[in-house]
Image (cartoon, grey):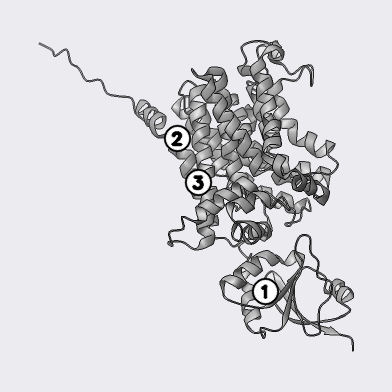
Amino acid sequence: MCSSHVKIAEHPGSRWRRLIERWGGWLPLACGIIAAAPALARELWFDEALTLTNFMLPLTPGEIYTHYTIPNNQIVYTLLLKLWDGCYPGLLDWVSFWRLLSLAAALAALALLFRLRRRLDANHPWPALWVLSAFALSGVFAIYATALRGYAVSWFWVALALYGAWRIFHGPRGAWGWGLYIAAALLAVGTVPTNLLALGAVVIYALPWSRKDFLKDGRLWLLAMVPPLALLLFYGPIWRDFAHTFTLNEGFAGRLSALAVIYGAIVSVFGLLLLFCWRRAWMRDWRVTARLIVWLLPARLIVWLLPALAVLLLHRAPFPRVFVPLFPVYAMLLADGVADWRPSLKTAAILAAAWVAVQLWLGWAAPRAASAAGLSVYEDDYFRPWYMAETYSVRSVLPELRRRPPATPVFLSFNSDPCPVLFYAAQAGLQRDFRADVPQFRVAALPHGALLILRRDENPADFERRFGGALEPLGSTALHAFYRLQLKR
């Protein structure tokens, strides 16, 4: 008599699918760690050192909020870094430990986006795995997930705002969603005021979640009102200092080059997945089409146009890094494009192999395309910025400083990365008479015999005219050139 309990062999594909569904959420995190870990030990560059030496290290938390002299003080991030600094365990060098805060925020953003996608995609892991892994393995992720700046933290705030907005329209308790969204908006604008753009993208992304005509849905109007109100609330007590930053007139070299950089970065990050972004772009319900902006353009497609609108309409093109916080929303849009696709394991493997090949090619081609287009490494926020190069080292100037008597004045040009030089000199105990061009200060004169440290590609004749003397070459490193000032007698 045959037993009724017959054990049926499980198809190998089913086991793989179950493993991916259970453990797949760790894949983007592993990719992010692999991409970012080599950059944790890189040296400081200008903006990072300026944040440390002018705001985080010398100021108390209360002073960090009130000292908003330049946008380098990304207040919420600087406060978090101050708290993080107080937890230093002594196992790593200071800079690598500080960078771990950004990496932790970037990984938390990936985890939160993966959780949200699982809810949107009926627990199906593939859309989030493809898109978030592409993001995590990109050069953009490696740069900003290890930067001592507030952009990785901004990714987390934007992801939290997306999650809060979803809870407002779909969660059992809308109040909890409102709490998350309001907190995320306040912290996002408190980190970088231009995060208003990313929060605007969140509002646009949430339009289809409305269950009726968006013009009549009060939740959407409140969703749109929260970010500007958060900006007023956060910067209201320091409004005069905040308004003063707009007089600095900072911006990118050109509008077309700015557009090429940001959209080139999107292509280099997501690659092959961009082919799928149109699959669910056209909303089924015409009532949630943003007809007040463009009659026939679906609202979510407008998110792709936000950088172009900002670059073309503002009085000066913003730095492309301003648009880094938009990447979580772009990841959501691309995940929408593949959300309805349920490939077989074989098809998924073929696509994954093609995606890896395209990503590797883009990683090789993007910096070369930037170079061929004439984009300077000093204007490059995404592809091959000079501070990510293997040859980048400001500590290499320390031996030259040690050879000079302590009383010798040392001039550092603005382009020579003076802030990290000052940081590493202080760390090494080198007390010198430093005179540096830094934001809001320019050295007027130098005495005879002063040591000048310039970036290697700077023209010494410009400084001879500026200081009224001849520059005697003393030597150079991969990045810097050293001169002695000989004044005319």
Q: Secondary structure at mark 3?
A: helix
Asked where in the image residue 329 lies, by quadrant, the reply is top right
Is residue 267 visible to the viewer in this orientation of the structure? no
Dot 1 or dot 2, earlier in sequence: 2
Which amino acid is tagged 1? Answer: Thr
- Residue 99 lies left or right of residue 300; in this view the side is left
Nearer the camera: disc 3 or disc 2:
3
The x, y position of residue 259, in whole percent, is 77, 41
144 or 191: nearer the eye?
Answer: 191
The x, y position of residue 323, in whole percent, is 70, 40
Q: CA distance from mark 1 to mark 2?
A: 45 Å
The x, y position of residue 188, in whole percent, is 63, 38
Dot 3 or dot 1, earlier in sequence: 3
Labels 3 & 1 near each other (Cβ < 8 A): no
Nearer the camera: disc 3 or disc 1:
3
The 10 Å Cα crowd at callout 1, few under 14, some 14 to 19, many 20 or more, is some
426 or 283: nearer the eye?
Answer: 426
Q: Which residue is mark 1?
A: 477
Q: Pick the quarter of the image with the N terminus.
A: top left
Q: CA distance from mark 3 to mark 1?
A: 34 Å
Q: Which residue is mark 3?
A: 104
Instruction: Specify the label residue 25 is tagged with.
Output: 2
The x, y position of residue 137, in whole percent, is 55, 44
Asked where in the image residue 293 lies, by quadrant, the reply is top right
- Residue 401 lies left or right of residue 97; in this view the side is right
Residue that appears at 57% across and 60% down: 42
